Image (tube, rainbow, N blue to C red):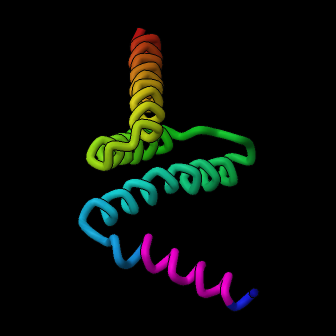
Amino acid sequence: MLIQYGQDLSNYLYDVFVAKFDFWLAFGLVAQLLFTARFLVQWISSERAGQSVVPMAFWFFSMGGGLMTLVYGIVKREPVIILGQAMATVIYVRNIMLIVKNHASGSRTLDR
């Protein structure tokens, strides 16, 4: 029975990651790696600061990975991915806009 589960798992993993490997699977995997990199960037920045911080790079990785995952979802016709990433990407872009706005207004007050 345990051997059968192992064979079934092996067959499943082969089917998902090898038999169906194409450009879009590679694209989706790169998108997911880019999206996951944001947590590594955030963790390293927080460790350096000694407190929890969210660096600008976090939002750029979020936006890049989110947009790539959205494209992947559209191509693969996955409504859950499309809805989730479309809404999340708006939030990523808005956060970047707010950060840029705050930096711009902060630099103006320093010029005065």
Q: Main secondary structure of the magenta part?
A: helix
Give the quarter of the figure containing the C terminus: top left
Residue 6 part of the magenta-drawn span: yes
Q: Is residue 69 above or below residue 30?
A: above
Q: Residue at x 28, y 60 (%)?
A: 24
Q: Is residue 74 above or below residue 33?
A: above
Residue 64 shows in this picture:
no
Residue 42 part of the magenta-drawn span: no
Q: Residue at x 35, y 77 (%)?
A: 19
Residue closest to the eye, 20 or 82: 20
- Is 41 on the left-hand or right-hand side of 16? right
Residue closest to the eye, 72 or 57: 72
Residue 81 % position (x, y): 44, 41
Residue closest to the eye, 81 or 92: 81
Q: Is residue 97 above or below residue 20?
A: above
Residue 55 % position (x, y): 53, 40
Q: Which residues are magenta?
A: 4-16
Residue closest to the eye, 96 or 71: 71
Give the residue furthest to the bottom.
3
Query: In terms of image quadrants, where is residue 83?
Result: top left
Query: In terms of image quadrants, where is residue 8?
Result: bottom right
Residue 61 % position (x, y): 43, 46
Give the quarter of the figure containing the N terminus: bottom right
- Is 48 on the left-hand or right-hand side of 60? right
Residue 57 shows in this picture:
yes
Q: Residue at x 38, y 47 (%)?
A: 69
Q: Is residue 14 above or below residue 42?
A: below
Q: Residue at x 47, y 31 (%)?
A: 88
